[in-house]
Image (cartoon, rainbow, N blue to C red):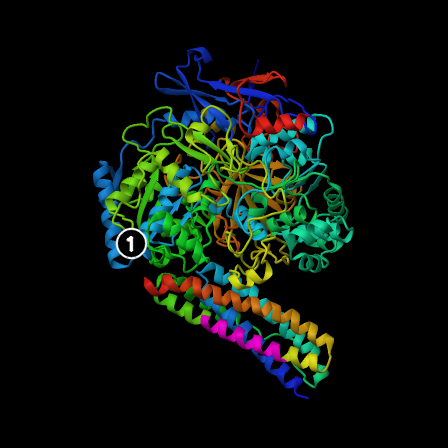
């Protein structure tokens, strides 16, 4: 049974998404909605990491329930950097790059959750299916947020 | 007839009436000293623009000067009554410091010039930026205080002529959430309520809505119900001891930022007890199951921990709401300007929806407006949305709008949601918006985190145009200042929250060279050479009435249908509620009466957004969810505020308003009676917190947040422990600082956080972490009114209670029912007669 391997991959990918969202938040502090929302949405992924770890033991995986931490000193430096770069047009392109990356990572996580849900149905594990459905619903909202922000931000950055 | 000090008694004389009865007429009149009604040369019809209630009145004119006002007895909104801001505020029109000539910046200073020179500057900069960068370089920021004709013209210029997506109104600060909440629940803006619902309701629930101060005449109507037989129960949600809270059956005072948790707990109880209308839910809604699932997690005992509201109080409120037979719900800034504004306001809609309490007398929702013409800003497209509630993500709507304007659909920007104000400020900060035209509003006082706002507006590289009637804080930073005419000096229509359209006629000439905003916008369009696709001028109208006729055509077949209204029909009688068309020639008192909504995928104004992330809902997703256009029940999880109290900032700051001032006081501070009633800023603190910090009534204190600090005298009052309140009205134009602090700060927005609701994009003014410390001992009580939410809680010298200047006496004529004025017509006359049968 390879369910454990998929959960391990998903655990890594959710951690990665959470960290990327926190990084975006730090880098784009002057874009206030991105700063606040990326942090809020990172919390969802961090919670998913805990839930995956809690259930993965049954599938032979010892996963760290604690989401990967953020480097607070580095964060502060980035935030300061963001404030300084707040009036630099190049920061706009970096924002698009970061949102694109968030979107791609969220898509990857979405595919992972689909795999988990398929496996859970195959083995009739309703607990796992319940976790997958609940977390995947939030993941899809993260994905739509990144995509929506990308679209909304692109025109002004690219044409001005 | 009685004479009464309406500063001391803002709501005037009681005229009690019972459920289903007719609200008696009481005509309020205030005239300048030495003028009596007989000596007035003429009375000119208008409605209030100093608050959002839409009170109809006549302006008294003598020797071509405004000399007073009188409420219109026959109007459905106010039945003759006026609020203090209307009774005294008209005096500001004649202030000596009105702008009378255009100003341009020369050598760093603003100097007087003529209209040609000023407009040439604006036009040449516009053209240069269009050539160099395109429409994305230009932004327009307007207000909630102009007329429909003016907004429609501005929206047409920006969207159809310039082609920029950067258009918004300061309605973003006050009613963006009202609009968004209606769009989320019903697919479209437009109030499913009427003021006459007050006459019938057995429960009135006010959520973050201090109606006693923001819409005094609407509160007067409620007070008269409370004083009559079978009064309604009142539910009040507010962290302050407002007049509404004092009159309430149940008062819930939640911790700032926790409204969604509170609403979910109320819904939890209503659903758990089965106080829902299953037939209505089955027939007319989608999404109920998700709500049921979500609110199941919010048991009152758990939510009591989050909100600080005792579980039994939550349960009591739910019981009253759950047993209501005719429920009127109203919402305002306590929800809109707080954490999760849209999600909280939508939960209010959900209560009325799942209880089937819509479209019948007494059953309605009023997602209130903060400003007099906010509804027009929204419907005319001056808030960024497309005119007449057209959907930017529906290609058929774009095509239709292009037909109305006779332009290419591609020239109307619709590739993304409209740029909301806070994003426009960000673009001005990053240098990609290079010209900002501000009309009728004062962002240098009203926006959050003022040090940041000033640094943006002061930039050399930003060309700032300000069109206003006084040299406001914002105008002082402008490159070009255009002097405008105001209420009483120009003609146009305005629409209030319950969809009542009023005509406001010109009574006197504007001072000096000041011009109506409509004329300024049209002049700009012509100088810019804006054309339709046949090479004809884009703006084909040249007067208020011809602009109104053009606007009517734009609304044909849309929810806000004005096609049945004419200036002639608005003259003489009562205001008329839209939709007004061939089917409903006298207007429409209640929408959604038959459980039919404007939410059909082909008709709706929007497909909605995720209430938490703000991500737009995809059209195909919406069609799948709601193919028949039912009401949409949207659930939302509680998300804590982004800035929570800490050791350094242990308190929570909320900002707000007082009865006696409007917005940034540009007019109300120039009316002596209003200014005297609330002359300077104050800060409110509970007695418990005052004890903790060793502060007494009237002491000077410093309030600080991570953004800055403000000094104000302390009023110890009935506010929730742990919360401090600052009124946001007080800026710097009447201080030595001019447009900024000279020493200690005074404007509440020095302190507020830059953060907004992801769905409505309304800034959050009511959730910031703060601290307070004593600066100096008192030399008297704080300059705060004593007869409003800022009433003192302890002993207070009787001689210092709020009362009016000698000139504050107002005539009140109560007309007993059945002897009302003859010749009244329009919506309310009909409704009241039916109701009294």
Residue B706 placement (x, y as % from top left): 50, 54
Q: Quadrant of residue B441?
A: top left
Answer above or below: position of A98 versus B184: below
Viewer-closest of B715 and A19: A19
Name the dominant secondary structure of the magenta segment: helix
Near-viewer residue (B39 or A36): B39
Residue nearest the viewer, comparing B451 with B20: B20
Query: At x 59% / y 71%, what residue is drawn?
Result: A45
- Count of numbered marks: 1
Residue A78 seen by the camera: yes
**Horizontal and vertical percent for residue A73?**
50, 70
Q: Which segment did they paint magenta?
A: A100-115
Q: Position of residue B552 (x, y in %)?
A: 42, 40
Which residue is under mark 1?
B461
Q: Chain of mark 1?
A: B
- Indicate left or right for B228 with B770 as reference: right
Q: Is residue B459 above or below residue B28?
A: below
Residue sticking out furthest to the top: B38
| Residue lying at 48% horizontally and 62% vertically, measured from the top left | A34
Q: Secondary structure at mark 1?
A: loop
Quadrant of the rendering where the N terminus of chain B is positioned:
top right
Mark 1, Cα crowd under 10 Å, few <14 / some 14-19 / many 20+, is some
Question: Residue at point 61% right, 71% down?
Answer: A136
Image-quadrant location for residue B781: top right
Q: x%, y% of residue A32?
A: 47, 59
Q: Quadrant of residue B483?
A: top left
Q: Does A20 lie within the magenta span?
A: no
Using the image, determine if residue B793 lies above or below residue B12: below
Classify residue B807 as left or right of residue B126.
right
**Does any portion of residue B469 appear in the rendered image?**
no
């Amino acid at each position: 049974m390879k369910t454990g391997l998929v959960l391990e991959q998903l655990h890594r990918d959710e951690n990665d998404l959470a960290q990327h969202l926190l990084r975006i938040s730090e880098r784009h502090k002057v874009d206030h909605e991105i700063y606040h929302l990326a942090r809020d949405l990172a919390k969802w992924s961090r919670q998913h990491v805990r839930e995956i770890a809690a259930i993965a033991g049954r599938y032979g995986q010892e996963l760290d329930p604690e989401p990967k931490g953020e480097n607070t000193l580095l964060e502060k430096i980035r935030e300061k950097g963001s404030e300084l770069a707040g009036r630099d047009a190049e920061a706009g392109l970096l924002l698009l790059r970061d949102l694109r990356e968030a979107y791609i990572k969220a898509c990857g996580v979405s595919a992972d959750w689909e795999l988990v849900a398929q496996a859970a149905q195959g083995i009739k594990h309703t607990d796992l299916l319940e976790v997958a459905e609940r977390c995947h619903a939030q993941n899809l909202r993260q994905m739509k947020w990144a995509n929506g922000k990308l679209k909304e931000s692109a025109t002004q950055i690219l044409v001005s | 007839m009685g004479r009464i000090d309406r500063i001391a008694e803002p709501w005037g004389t009681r005229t009690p009436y019972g459920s289903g009865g007719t609200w008696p007429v009481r005509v309020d009149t205030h005239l300048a000293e030495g003028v009596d009604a007989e000596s007035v040369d003429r009375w000119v019809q208008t409605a209030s623009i100093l608050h959002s209630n839409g009170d109809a009145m006549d302006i008294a004119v003598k020797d071509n000067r405004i000399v007073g006002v009188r409420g219109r007895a026959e109007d459905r909104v106010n039945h003759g009554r006026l609020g203090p801001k209307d009774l005294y505020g008209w005096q500001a029109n004649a202030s000596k410091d009105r702008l009378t000539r255009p100003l341009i910046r020369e050598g760093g200073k603003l100097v007087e010039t003529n209209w040609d020179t000023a407009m040439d500057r604006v036009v040449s900069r516009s053209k240069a930026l269009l050539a160099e960068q395109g429409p994305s370089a230009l932004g327009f920021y307007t207000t909630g205080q102009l007329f429909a004709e003016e907004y429609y013209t501005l929206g047409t210029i920006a969207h159809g002529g310039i082609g920029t997506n950067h258009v918004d109104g300061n309605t973003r600060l006050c009613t963006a959430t009202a609009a968004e909440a209606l769009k989320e629940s019903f697919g479209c803006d437009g109030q499913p309520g009427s003021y006459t619902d007050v006459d019938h309701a057995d429960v009135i629930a006010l959520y973050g809505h201090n109606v006693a101060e923001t819409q005094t005449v609407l509160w007067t109507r409620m007070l008269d119900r409370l004083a009559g037989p079978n009064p309604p129960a009142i539910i009040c949600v507010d962290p302050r001891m407002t007049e509404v809270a004092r009159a309430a059956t149940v008062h819930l005072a939640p911790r700032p930022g926790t409204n969604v948790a509170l609403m979910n707990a109320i819904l939890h109880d209503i659903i758990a007890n089965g106080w829902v209308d299953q037939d209505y839910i089955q027939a007319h809604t989608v999404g109920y199951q998700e709500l049921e699932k979500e609110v199941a997690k919010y048991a009152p005992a758990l939510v009591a921990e989050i909100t600080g509201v005792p579980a039994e109080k939550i349960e009591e409120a739910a019981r009253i709401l759950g047993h209501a037979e005719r429920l009127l719900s109203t919402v305002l800034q306590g929800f809109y300007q707080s954490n999760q504004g849209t999600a909280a306001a939508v939960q209010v809609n959900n209560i009325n929806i799942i209880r089937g309490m819509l479209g019948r007398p007494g059953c309605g929702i009023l997602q209130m407006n903060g400003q007099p013409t906010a509804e027009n800003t929204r419907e005319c497209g001056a808030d960024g949305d497309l005119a007449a509630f057209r959907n930017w993500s529906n290609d058929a709507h774009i095509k239709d709008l292009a037909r109305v304007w006779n332009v290419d659909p591609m020239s109307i920007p619709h590739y993304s949601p409209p740029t909301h104000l806070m994003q426009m400020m960000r673009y001005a900060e990053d240098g990609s918006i290079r010209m900002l035209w501000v009309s009728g509003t004062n962002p240098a006082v009203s926006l959050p985190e003022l040090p940041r706002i000033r640094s943006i507006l002061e930039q050399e590289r930003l060309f700032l145009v300000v069109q206003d009637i006084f040299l406001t804080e914002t105008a002082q930073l402008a490159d070009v200042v255009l002097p405008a005419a105001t209420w009483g000096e120009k003609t146009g229509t305005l629409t209030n929250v319950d969809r009542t359209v009023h005509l406001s006629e010109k009574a006197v000439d504007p001072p000096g060279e000041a011009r109506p905003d409509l004329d300024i916008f049209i002049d700009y369009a012509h100088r810019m050479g804006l054309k339709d696709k046949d090479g004809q001028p884009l703006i084909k109208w040249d007067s208020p009435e011809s602009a109104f006729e053009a606007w009517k055509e734009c609304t044909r077949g849309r929810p806000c249908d004005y096609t049945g209204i004419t200036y002639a029909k608005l003259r003489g009688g009562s205001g008329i509620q839209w939709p007004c068309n061939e089917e409903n020639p006298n207007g429409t008192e209640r929408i959604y009466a038959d459980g039919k909504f404007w939410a059909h995928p082909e008709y709706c104004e929007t497909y909605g957004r995720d209430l938490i992330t703000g991500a737009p809902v995809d059209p195909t997703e919406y069609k799948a969810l709601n193919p028949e256009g039912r009401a949409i029940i949207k659930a939302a999880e509680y998300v804590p505020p982004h800035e929570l109290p800490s050791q350094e900032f242990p308190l929570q700051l909320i900002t707000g308003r007082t009865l006696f001032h409007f917005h940034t006081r540009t007019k109300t501070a120039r009316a002596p009676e209003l200014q005297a009633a609330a002359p300077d800023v104050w800060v409110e603190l509970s007695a418990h917190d005052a004890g903790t910090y060793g502060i007494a009534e009237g002491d000077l204190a410093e309030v600080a947040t991570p953004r800055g600090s403000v000094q104000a005298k302390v009023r110890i009052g009935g506010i929730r422990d742990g919360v401090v309140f600052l009124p946001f009205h007080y800026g710097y134009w009447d201080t030595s600082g001019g447009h900024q602090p000279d020493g200690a700060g005074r404007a509440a927005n020095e302190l507020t956080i830059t953060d907004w609701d992801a769905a409505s994009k309304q800034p959050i003014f009511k959730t910031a972490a703060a601290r307070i410390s004593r600066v100096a001992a008192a030399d008297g009580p704080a300059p705060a009114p004593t007869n409003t939410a800022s009433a003192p809680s302890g002993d207070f010298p009787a001689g210092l209670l709020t009362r009016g200047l000698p000139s504050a006496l107002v005539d009140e004529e109560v007309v007993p029912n059945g002897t009302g004025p003859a010749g009244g017509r329009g919506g309310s006359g009909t409704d009241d007669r039916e109701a009294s049968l």
